[in-house]
Amino acid sequence: MENPLYNVCAIAMAAYRDPELTTEKMLENIFAIAHHHKHDCLVLSAFGCGAFKNPPEHIALLFKSVIYQYAGYFKTIYFAIVVDHNTGNRINPDGNFLPFKTILDGLNVHPPTTIRVNGVSGSNRILNKTSDGK
């Protein structure tokens, strides 16, 4: 990032080792909360890939899935990936930055033109073809 960000709000959500919620659901919650509060930009981390040793490739792929789910909801999504003493171990021998860069760099998503029954757009699941259930 060449220029600092100003007027930024933060959402903190802990990355648990054995959560009752799935990691993907926790990531969806971050996006849903940000959208609910009308944020148009996200700055995200390598969620749980440090001290909790979540595999960065897996977490990056989960983020990619949620980014597609929320396509068109945010103008920009950044990842701030820290290289520290928790990276470069057997879980993430390449560190956290490289897997996130490989999977997410240059990703450009657009809202779907059609949504199918049981499809998802943001936090909404489409249950019926019409609003009256027919």
Image (spheres, rainbow, N blue to C red):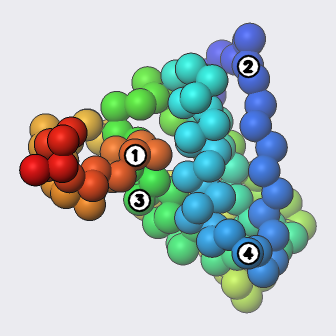
SS category of the residue bearing label 1: strand
SS category of the residue bearing label 2: loop
Quadrant containing the N terminus is top right
- The three-letter amino acid code for the residue at tag 2 is Val
Q: Which residue is mark 2?
A: 8
Q: Which residue is mark 4?
A: 20
Q: Is residue 114 left or right of residue 28?
A: left
Q: Is residue 67 above or below residue 5?
A: below
Q: CA distance from mark 1 to mark 3?
A: 15 Å
Residue at the image position 25 percent from the left and 37 percent from the top? 111
Sequence order check, earlier mark of 2 and 4: 2
SS category of the residue bearing label 4: loop
Q: Residues within 10 Å of mark 3 (few under 14, many from 20)?
A: some
Residue at the image position 26 percent from the left and 60 percent from the top? 118
Q: Residues within 10 Å of mark 1 (few under 14, many from 20)?
A: few
Q: CA distance from mark 3 to mark 2?
A: 25 Å
Q: CA distance from mark 4 to mark 3?
A: 20 Å
- The three-letter amino acid code for the residue at tag 4 is Glu
Q: Is residue 46 above or below residue 75?
A: below
Sequence order check, earlier mark of 1 and 4: 4
Residue at the image position 65 percent from the left and 58 percent from the top? 26
Query: Quick check: can you spot residue 56?
Result: no
Sequence order check, earlier mark of 1 and 3: 3
The total of numbered circles placed on residues is: 4
